Amino acid sequence: QVQLVESGGGLVQAGGSLRLSCAASGGFFRSYNMGWFRQAPGKEREFVATINWSGTSTNYADSVKGRFTVSRDNAKNTLYLQMNSLKPEDTADYYCAADLPRGSMTSPTQYRYWGQGTQVTVSS
């Protein structure tokens, strides 16, 4: 079973950048597809990005395409989310998730393992 810990959140002005990290331990990180999700107050958790086990395939929500980049370093058991050109509507708690590959990996129900989240606030 893998444990996930996110870091890198914070307060940033609109147009700025942040890089989130997700450190994995206790499992076979390189076996898992990884995802980033976010949840704003009063809203459901939504898909942001996913990356396959080898890092060769990625997928993004339309709302972040061209601004966010997901990557992973299997040697360091770490997942990243580079967020550029941030907008106030990107404000949310961001979560990383892991599971064995199955389907699109764009739904929260496709992941068993979750981090505790890191807060991102974008001011206008």
Image: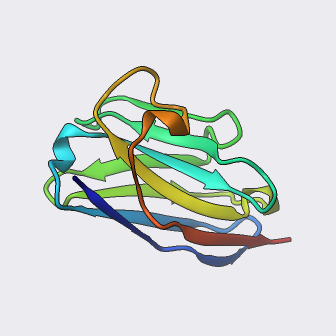
- Residue 57 in the image, given as x and y percentages of width and height: 36, 29
Q: Nearer the viewer, residue 76 or 42?
A: 42
Q: Quadrant of the C terminus?
A: bottom right
Place of residue 75 in the rendered image (x, y in percent of width and height, measured from the top left): 13, 56
> Picture coordinates of residue 21 (x, y %)?
40, 65
Q: Is residue 62 above or below residue 77?
A: above
Look at the image and name its color scheme: rainbow
> Residue at coordinates 28% horizontally, 33% vertically from top-left?
100
Return the x and y of residue 10 as percentages of the image width and height. Answer: 61, 78
User: In the image, what residue occupies the spot 29% across and 38% down?
Assistant: 55
Q: Is residue 26 left or right of residue 62?
A: left
Residue drawn at x 55%, y 73% as measured from the top left: 9
Pick whichever, 116 or 60, lies toward us.
Answer: 116
The quadrant holding residue 39 is bottom right
Q: Residue furthest top?
A: 103
Task: Give the residue at the far right of this rendering.
Answer: 124
Relative to 3, 39 lies left or right: right
Question: In the rendered picture of this protein, how many numbered marks are placed on residues?
Answer: 0
35 displayed left or right of 10? left
Instruction: Find residue 41 and report its image quarter.
Output: bottom right
Extreme residue in the bottom direction: 11
Vertically, is 16 above or below 96?
below
Q: Nearer the viewer, residue 50 or 19?
A: 50
